[in-house]
Image (cartoon, rainbow, N blue to C red):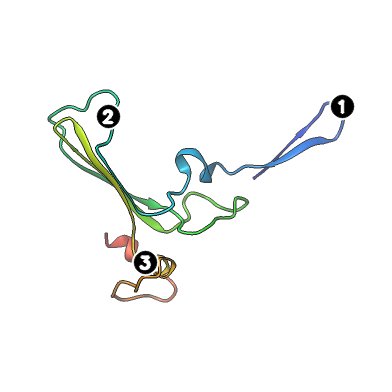
Amino acid sequence: MAVSGRNARGPAVSTIEVNKWIEGPYAPIPGDVTATELEVIGELPAELEGRYLRNGPNPIGPVDPATHHWFVGDAMVHGIRIREGRADWYRARYVRSTAVSEALGEAPAPGERHGTFDTANTNV
């Protein structure tokens, strides 16, 4: 989205390219991630135990700031393991669709494909 401002006395003073979907908390993660011994700010109840998983978009290649939206992108699964008042690990992995496998130089996962669509992200 382009943002421009008008000075009360004259023409537009600037044009700035801004896309909030590729910055800050919405910025794509550049690849698979594993982080351990995570710092907890505050306290996690000792009784809270399990894994939290989230599947969402994360583009594997460069994006065009003029057109990119955060709903568009290859699938990535994020997970965190919580137990005994600790956050043991955070992991993020691309779902190995045909496009992701090709971009990473890997052989595609076996299975049916339906035209140009790949349903890998529905079978995590």
Q: What residue is at 76 percent from the left and 37 percent from the top?
A: 14
* Residue 112, x across and y down, in percent: 31, 76
Residue 46, picture quadrant: top left
Q: Residue at x 38, y 68 (%)?
A: 101
Check the image and report above or below for 111 versus 11: below
Q: How far apart are labels 2 and 1 at the CA level?
A: 52 Å
- Residue drawn at x 62%, y 42% is 18
Provide the secondary structure element on which disc 1 rests.
loop
Under mark 3, the amino acid is Ser
Q: Is residue 32 above or below residue 111?
A: above
Front of the two marks 3 and 1 = 3
The quarter of the picture where the C terminus appears is bottom left
- Dot 2 alpha-carbon crowd within 10 angstroms: few under 14, some 14 to 19, many 20 or more: few
Identify the mark at residue 9; answer none if there is no mark: 1
* Residue at the outermost top position: 42
Point 44% across, 67% down: residue: 103
Q: Which residue is mark 2?
A: 40
